[in-house]
Image (spheres, rainbow, N blue to C red):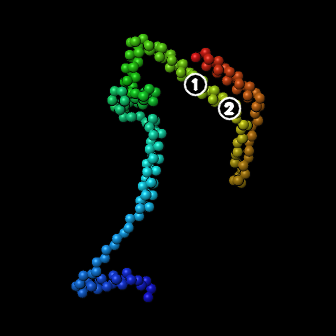
């Protein structure tokens, strides 16, 4: 007899007892708690929380808060976004700060320092780009334009490396002079 088991026999006996007006036997199941599984699950959830917290901390400064930390006003204007990323407070606080500097007579000095700092940052960026350009290899491009669908042609550009290095060095020297004149 296929599929015969004690459980089926027990179920049939219980059904027969119910049909005869009797009560079926009561069975109590006791399960043992799997402590190893619980520990693994707890460790997994803790690791997941730590991973989420690390990501949250990494992006924390990139997010703008709802309220200005200085004046507690709601930062919902477009200019609040800009001022938050530049000065860490809302547009109204920046207006008050600049007004106070104008009254004190320090605004022009602050503005000049800001302009010089922006110029120096631009010069640093240009120097980095020129150094990367100077160290580049000859460019190669792979193009697939034949009708067979699997042939690839390689296009290699010829670059005079010595003139490239000379021009890059001249540009770096010029940027150094500009940087020295601004400091």
173 to the left or right of 96: right
Q: Is residue 25 above or below residue 44?
A: below
Q: Position of residue 54 (x, y in %)?
A: 47, 43
- The residue under the point 38% across, 16% down is 100
Q: Quadrant of the C terminus?
A: top right
* Rendered position, 142 above or below 118: below
Residue closest to the eye, 7 or 88: 7
Q: Quadrant of the N terminus?
A: bottom left
Q: Nearer the viewer, residue 102 or 6?
A: 6
Q: Residue at x 62, y 26 (%)?
A: 126
- Looking at the image, residue 143 sits to the left or right of residue 35; the answer is right
Q: Find residue 142 and report its image quarter.
A: top right
Residue at point 50% right, 20% down?
Answer: 114
Toward which corner of the image does residue 132 lie, by quadrant?
A: top right
Q: Return the x and y of residue 154 as percentages of the image width and height.
A: 74, 44
Q: Residues within 10 Å of mark 2 (few under 14, many from 20)?
A: few
Left or right for 78, reference 20: right
Categorize mark 1 by other alpha carbons within 10 Å: few (<14), some (14-19), many (20+): few
Write down the residue under mark 1: 122
Mark number displayed over residue 135: none
Label disc, if present, on residue 133 of the rendered structure = 2
Q: Secondary structure at mark 2?
A: helix
Whether residues under marks 2 and 1 lie with C-beta atoms below 8 angstroms apart, the answer is no
Instruction: Determine the secondary structure under disc 1.
Output: helix
Residue 7 sits in quarter: bottom left
Find the distance from the CA under tag 2 to the CA under tag 1. Answer: 16 Å
């Amino acid at each position: 007899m296929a599929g015969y088991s004690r459980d089926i026999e027990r179920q049939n006996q219980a059904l027969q007892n119910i049909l005869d007006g009797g009560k079926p036997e009561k069975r109590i199941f006791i399960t043992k708690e799997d402590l190893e599984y619980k520990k693994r699950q707890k460790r997994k959830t803790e690791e997941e929380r730590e991973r989420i917290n690390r990501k949250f901390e990494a992006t924390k400064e990139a997010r703008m808060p709802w309220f200005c930390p200085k004046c507690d006003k709601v930062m919902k204007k477009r200019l609040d976004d800009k001022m938050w990323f530049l000065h860490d407070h809302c547009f109204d606080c920046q207006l008050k700060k600049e007004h106070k500097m104008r009254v004190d007579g320090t605004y022009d000095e602050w503005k000049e320092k800001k302009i010089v700092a922006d110029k120096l940052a631009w010069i640093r960026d240009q120097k980095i780009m020129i150094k990367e350009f100077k160290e580049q290899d000859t460019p190669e491009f792979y193009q697939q334009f034949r009708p067979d669908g699997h042939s690839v042609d390689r296009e290699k550009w010829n670059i005079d490396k010595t003139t490239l290095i000379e021009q890059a060095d001249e540009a770096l020297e010029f940027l150094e002079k500009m940087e020295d004149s601004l400091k």
